[in-house]
Image: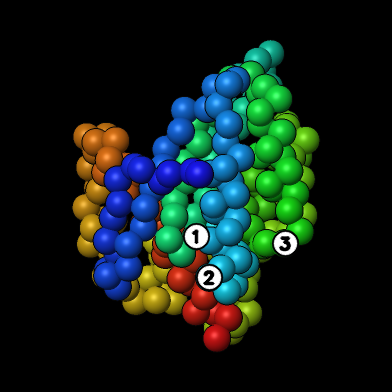
């Protein structure tokens, strides 16, 4: 049974997000954690998983090479952060299968370039994805929101208190590991709630 035994954080609506950060090695079994994320997305009704990806970019022969270095998945109750190895091993096939799931929608902010880079650099294809900014622009009849980042989009749709996120991000270089995980959890939770709100 996968245990999300990292720090937990209370959100501004008093809901609780439990986290898990994993340094993935060739022997790491990530499948129980991915299953827990999948189950939470289904049990909580809207079958959505908020995702964000982070890249290492290196210049080789005047060309940029992009390597997926970490990925974050968020649901109503959980936030999973995977730090990936430089060389992908067989155990990451679980990640490929997870992204290819047709049972859930992967929701993100400004994800078009990420989708292209995932396919081009790693052969990862997300079967069902949603750019939340585009949905918000159509739902609210305000085209400009399509181009907003996570914080600005969430503020525009939800009007939640962003002071904790702002506090962490304003001192990012000095932020502790726990603070950075909390910021990741808050951002995932915000986009989950934006998507939930736009479904009404």
Residue 145 horizontal/vertical position (percent): 52, 71
Q: Nearer the viewer, residue 161 or 100?
A: 100
Task: Give me the C-alpha separation between circle 3 and circle 1.
Answer: 14 Å
Q: Residues within 10 Å of mark 1 (few under 14, many from 20)?
A: many
| Marks 1 and 2 in Cβ contact (< 8 Å) | yes
Left or right: where 164 falls relative to 123: left
Residue 149 horizontal/vertical position (percent): 47, 58
Mark 3 or 2 closer to N-term?
2
Q: Disc 3 on helix, strand or loop?
A: loop
Q: Residue at x 27, y 61 (%)?
A: 10
Query: Residue 176's image quarter?
Result: top left
Location of mark 2 (residue): 44
**The C terminus lies in which quarter of the figure?**
bottom right
Left or right: where 195 falls relative to 164: right
Q: Disc 1 on helix, strand or loop?
A: loop
Q: Which numbered marker is on residue 103? A: 3
Q: Disc 2 on helix, strand or loop?
A: loop
Q: Residue at x 58, y 59 (%)?
A: 39
| Res. 195 in view | no
Q: Residue at x 23, y 62 (%)?
A: 163
Q: Nearer the viewer, residue 110 or 50?
A: 50
Q: Residues within 10 Å of mark 3 (few under 14, many from 20)?
A: some
Mark 3 or 1 closer to N-term?
1
**117 relative to 183, above or below:** above
Query: Residue 143's image quarter?
Result: bottom right
Left or right: where 73 falls relative to 158: right
Residue 34 horizontal/vertical position (percent): 58, 46
Task: Give me the C-alpha separation between circle 1 and circle 2.
Answer: 8 Å
Mark 1 or 2 closer to N-term?
2
Location of mark 1 (residue): 75
Task: Give me the C-alpha separation between circle 3 and circle 2.
Answer: 13 Å
């Amino acid at each position: 049974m996968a245990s999300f035994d990292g720090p937990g954080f209370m959100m501004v609506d008093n809901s609780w997000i439990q986290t898990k950060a994993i340094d993935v090695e060739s022997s790491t079994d990530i499948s129980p954690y991915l299953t827990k994320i999948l189950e939470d997305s289904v049990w909580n009704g809207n079958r959505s998983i908020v995702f964000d990806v982070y890249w290492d970019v290196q210049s080789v022969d005047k060309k940029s090479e992009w390597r997926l270095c970490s990925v974050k998945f968020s649901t109503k109750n959980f936030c999973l952060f995977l730090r990936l190895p430089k060389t992908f091993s067989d155990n990451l096939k679980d990640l490929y299968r997870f992204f290819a799931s047709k049972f859930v929608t992967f929701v993100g902010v400004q994800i078009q370039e990420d989708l292209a880079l995932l396919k081009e650099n790693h052969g990862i294809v997300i079967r069902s994805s949603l750019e939340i900014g585009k949905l918000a622009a159509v739902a609210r009849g305000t085209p400009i929101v399509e181009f907003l980042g996570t914080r600005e989009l969430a503020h525009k749709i939800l009007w939640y208190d962003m002071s904790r996120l702002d506090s962490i991000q304003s001192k990012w270089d000095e932020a502790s590991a726990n603070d950075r995980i909390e910021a990741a959890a808050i951002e995932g939770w915000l986009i989950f709630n934006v998507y939930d709100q736009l479904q009404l």
